[in-house]
Amino acid sequence: MKHIRYYFLPLLSILVFSSCQKEETFKHDASSPIVIDKFTPAAGGSGTEVLIYGSNFSPDTSRITVTVNGVKAYVEGVVEDRILVVVPRKAGTGKISVTIDGQAGVSKEDFNYQTSYVVSTLAGNGSAGYADGKGLAAAFNFGNRCGLDIDADGNLYVAEAENRRIRKVAPDGTVTTLAGSGKNEYAEGKGMEASFYLPMDVVVDKDGNIFTSDPAAWTIRKITPDGTTSLLGWFEAWGIGIDKRDGTLYYTDGKGSGSVYKVKPDGSADQIITGLSYPSDVAVDSKGNLFVVVNGNSIIQEYKYGTWEKGVTIGQSGATGLVNGAASDAKFEYPWMIATDTHDNLYVAGNGTWDGSSVNTNQCIRFIAAGTWQVSTYTGGSTAGFADGTGAAALFNAPTGVTVGKDGTVYVVDRKNNRIRKVIAE
């Protein structure tokens, strides 16, 4: 049952008292319509208490069902012309409906549901170091603009440049080392027998294999679920994207006049897009279209599958800032990595400056709605720091990597905080 918020107790007390005084004087008339005149507030998130004004209600709350956008709300109290309800989680924007004994009345206006995003720390104690363990017992040392990805079971795989390892983070926050000795060298092997120079990004295929870029070693390596590494090819790869339909890999080379490459089954690669200013990452949507982070120009550029012709440009080339809105109006500030969700929405890790600058205005994850290309701030803001919490209260310090689980949960490499953060839409 929904707990009553203390600051609404006076209002609820009035409803209860009024109900006691009036319960003999009003009743629901099944031959007359249920009318909703208005409700207040008109907008809010999960847990918001809404007062519905109208007529032909019932004093018996057990007979009353109220929904917001079709999702059942909790009825806290009722008097003759008012019903107090609590907005349920993930209701969405839509009409408020009051149903009594199968008879319904519907509001003329929509309730504007405002999703809140709750940020927590999944793993990492905030100090640069190396330790496996659960939650705050684990330690990371990213040291660079590292990425992560997630498998079908909700396990995260994180490239950790400074510790020269690939770490695995289970859904409960337990961190283990999947591969990497920590030595600054190139070696294949299983688990800690393998070595890396500068692991930067990871992607996971549908079979649970992990692929990691190591631009200092000019390699993309394959890691099986048991931690065994092997060479996929000699590439100067920074960001990696994967087409989940067939496992095709794409990578960016991060150069001043940079390119995007498509990896072929024989271990070679075709250069498919050229002339980009420091392309840092690439994501692939459900149709195979590519979305490239052009870090040097502070834009996200779409390329159509197969032809690789330009599609939508999101952001203003060469103009930096934290500006939301339409694709042509939005501004980013040297974004770094990008991810898609199951609906082809895009999530952009904002701070791709080489040193994770605290004056970068994008200490946040940006959201780009598929199809409309409207840009908004998903979580975080313009201030560098560390704080778990909801909405603008959450703070990040140089977020560089982002991925999205099949349930919509977002995970972030919080570089300067040396933590993996978790973002849940409430």
Image: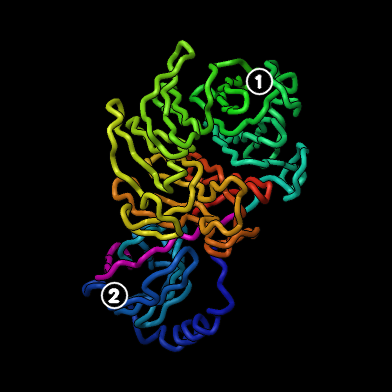
How many C-alpha atoms fall within 10 Å of the one at disc 1: few (<14), some, or many (≥20)?
Answer: few
Q: Earlier in the sequence, mark 1 or mark 2?
A: 2
> Vertically, is 332 above or below 110?
above
The magenta-colored residue range is 97-119
Mark 1 or 2, closer to the camera: 1
Q: Is residue 114 magenta?
A: yes
Name the residue type under label 2: Ile
Foreground residue among 86 and 247: 247
- Give the mark count: 2
Query: In the rendered image, which quarter contains the N terminus?
Result: bottom right
Of the numbered discs in the image, which one, if any, rests on residue 226?
1
Q: Are marks 1 and 2 in contact (CB under 8 Å)?
A: no
Name the residue type under label 1: Asp
> Vertically, is 51 above or below 134?
below
Which residue corresponds to mark 2?
Answer: 36
Measuring 32% from the left and 62% from the top, which residue is drawn there? Answer: 94
Measuring 26% from the left and 73% from the top, which residue is drawn there? Answer: 34
Measuring 45% from the left and 89% from the top, which residue is drawn there? Answer: 21
Residue 213 coordinates in the image, percent (x, y)? 57, 27
Q: Is residue 203 magenta?
A: no
For label 2, the SS is strand
Residue 257 coordinates in the image, percent (x, y)? 43, 34
How many C-alpha atoms fall within 10 Å of the one at disc 2: few (<14), some, or many (≥20)?
Answer: many
